[in-house]
Every structure is written in structure tokens, then in C-alpha cells.
Image: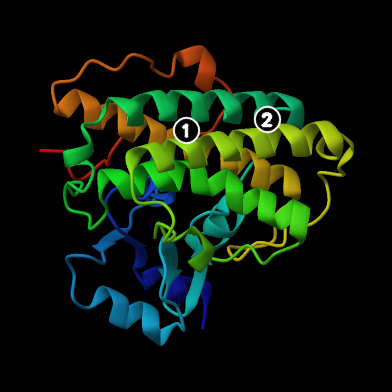
């Protein structure tokens, strides 16, 4: 198939609301002036069927015909979309660790302000509760730690926000978050600071370095913490702690907090 014939095949982005990587992928293409068909797999009944034909059942995915890329790896997205990608600078690992720790502190503070009887309220247009969102924020660095400490597979399934059996109350969830913070600090002090971050990341979404995985851990948790702050605001509760511009400087977060197509309301 010629390049002109390939360019006539529509570029599609498969996504779902509240997905930080999905939003970032859409914004990335928009910033580069790339037109695409937006497929919300939670609303378009054909979305998952089309992904299944590619042998996939996850988002975000950018596809042009049979040629596809996981939206988490921009160099691959640019290849499928047909433009040149320029690599961006990444904050040093030590700085990323500090940012992640602070993000988890803010997330814990926000979680503690949500009335416990509201924790199972669902987010708009997404079958994920406030409880699950909070857990996911802590889960992201935990999965990273499983990868570097235990060499466990970094899979899509590992990041599904399903709470363990032992976490049923707000207090237990807050305790889990504190455990993740302590574990991250211990790992960094013991071995993390001497880690070769140029090594392969060994993650499900593509060929990236461990440094890129650590950066993603930071902005991924940071984006969902922004959503947790928004959750409080929509409940009429003033957050006791927030993430400032300085806290997030240098992290490649999406511009929007929730989505560029779906409003919270």
C-alpha cells in the first residue's frame, strides 16, 4: 500500500473518560495539528470490537488501519500518525521521587476529606468510584515498586483499580497510601538512588527506559490527584492541600483535569 493510500485511512484514538493517558494522547495529537476520529469505548459499541480485531482490549490506542500504537509512548504515536516526534527532557530521578512523594501526601489529604459514605460515588461517565480513584493514585507507584524491587511484570491488569480484599475502609486506604510512601522512600534510600535508569522499563505499553517509567509514575499519579482535588470541589469541599504549579513543573501532565471532550457535569 502506497503512502498516499495509507494517509487516506482515518487515524483513530480509542479512549475512555477520566483516563489520564487517553487525555494526554488526544491533546498531544491536537497540539501537533493531527486530525483523528475520537472513539470513546464506553459509549461507542463498536470501539472494543475494533480493538479486538487488533488483538487489543485496552486504551489508549492510536490506530490507522492495522498499524497501531499504545498512546503512552509518544514516539510510537507520532510514527502511526505520520509526523516526527522530538524527545523532551525528563526531570532527574531524585527530583521525580520527591514529586511523587508530595503528590501522595496531597492525595492522602484529599482522600481524608471525602465523607466515607460518599466514597463509592461514581465519577462522571466512568465506572470508577472516588474510592477506586484514590486507591489508583497509590497503586501506580506501588506497581512501579513491584517492577524494580521484585521484577514483577508491569501489566495493564496490574493497574486496574480493584481494591484488595483487606482494604475496605477509608482509614485502611489511607494506611495503604502511607505504606506506599514509606516503601518508595526506603527503596530510594537503599537501592533506588544507584539504579541505572537508562535500562529498559519492561512495561506492557512499549519500549521505554526505566527513567520514562518513573516519570510516568509521577505525572500519572499527579493527574489523578488533580482529579481528586476536583472531586472535592464538585462536592463543595475546599481542599486543605492542593498541587501547585511548582509541584507539577516539568511533569508532562495533560492540560485538562478531566477531559477535553467530556465535562465533569
Name the residue nearer the viewer: 39 or 264. Answer: 264
Q: Which mark is residue 222?
A: 1
Q: Residue at x 70, y 64 (%)?
A: 152
Location of residue 193 by image quarter:
top right
Q: How is the image coloured?
A: rainbow
Q: Residue furthest left?
A: 265
In the image, residue 136 lies at what x, y percent? 43, 48
Is there any visible trace of residue 214 in the rendered image?
yes
Residue 183, percent from left and from top: 67, 39
- Residue located 53% across and 54% down the image: 72
What residue lies at 65% left-to-right and 24% top-to-bottom?
Answer: 98
Circle on res. 19? none
| SS at mark 2 in the image | helix
Q: Quadrant of residue 225?
A: top left
Q: Give percent across and percent down for residue 209.
A: 74, 51
Q: Which residue is mark 2?
A: 97
Pointer 2 with pointer 1, Cβ within 8 A: no
* 140 and 218: which is toward the camera: 140
Res. 88 image quadrant: top right
Amino acid at each position: 500500500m502506497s503512502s498516499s493510500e495509507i494517509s487516506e485511512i482515518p487515524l483513530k484514538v480509542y479512549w475512555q473518560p477520566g483516563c489520564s493517558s487517553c487525555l494526554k494522547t488526544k491533546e498531544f495529537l491536537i497540539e501537533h495539528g493531527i486530525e483523528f476520529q475520537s472513539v470513546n469505548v464506553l459509549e461507542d459499541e463498536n470501539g472494543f470490537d475494533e480493538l479486538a480485531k487488533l488483538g487489543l482490549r485496552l486504551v489508549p490506542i492510536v490506530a490507522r488501519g492495522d498499524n497501531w500504537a499504545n498512546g503512552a509512548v509518544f514516539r510510537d504515536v507520532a510514527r502511526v500518525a505520520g509526523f516526527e516526534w522530538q524527545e523532551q527532557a525528563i526531570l532527574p530521578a531524585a527530583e521525580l521521587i520527591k514529586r511523587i512523594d508530595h503528590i501522595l501526601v496531597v492525595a492522602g489529604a484529599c482522600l481524608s476529606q471525602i465523607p466515607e459514605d460518599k466514597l463509592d460515588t461514581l465519577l462522571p461517565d466512568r465506572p470508577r468510584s472516588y474510592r477506586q480513584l484514590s486507591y489508583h493514585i497509590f497503586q501506580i507507584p506501588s506497581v512501579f515498586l513491584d517492577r524494580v524491587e521484585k521484577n514483577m511484570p508491569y501489566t495493564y491488569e496490574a493497574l486496574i483499580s480493584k481494591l484488595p480484599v483487606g482494604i475496605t475502609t477509608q482509614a485502611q486506604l489511607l494506611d495503604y497510601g502511607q505504606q506506599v510512601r514509606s516503601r518508595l522512600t526506603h527503596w530510594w534510600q537503599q537501592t533506588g538512588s544507584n539504579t541505572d535508569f537508562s535500562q529498559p522499563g519492561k512495561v506492557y505499553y512499549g519500549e521505554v527506559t526505566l527513567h520514562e517509567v518513573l516519570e510516568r509514575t509521577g505525572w500519572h499519579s499527579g493527574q489523578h490527584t488533580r482529579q481528586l482535588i476536583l472531586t472535592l470541589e464538585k462536592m463543595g469541599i475546599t481542599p486543605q492541600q492542593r498541587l501547585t504549579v511548582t509541584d507539577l513543573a516539568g511533569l508532562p501532565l495533560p492540560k485538562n483535569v478531566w477531559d477535553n471532550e467530556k465535562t465533569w457535569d
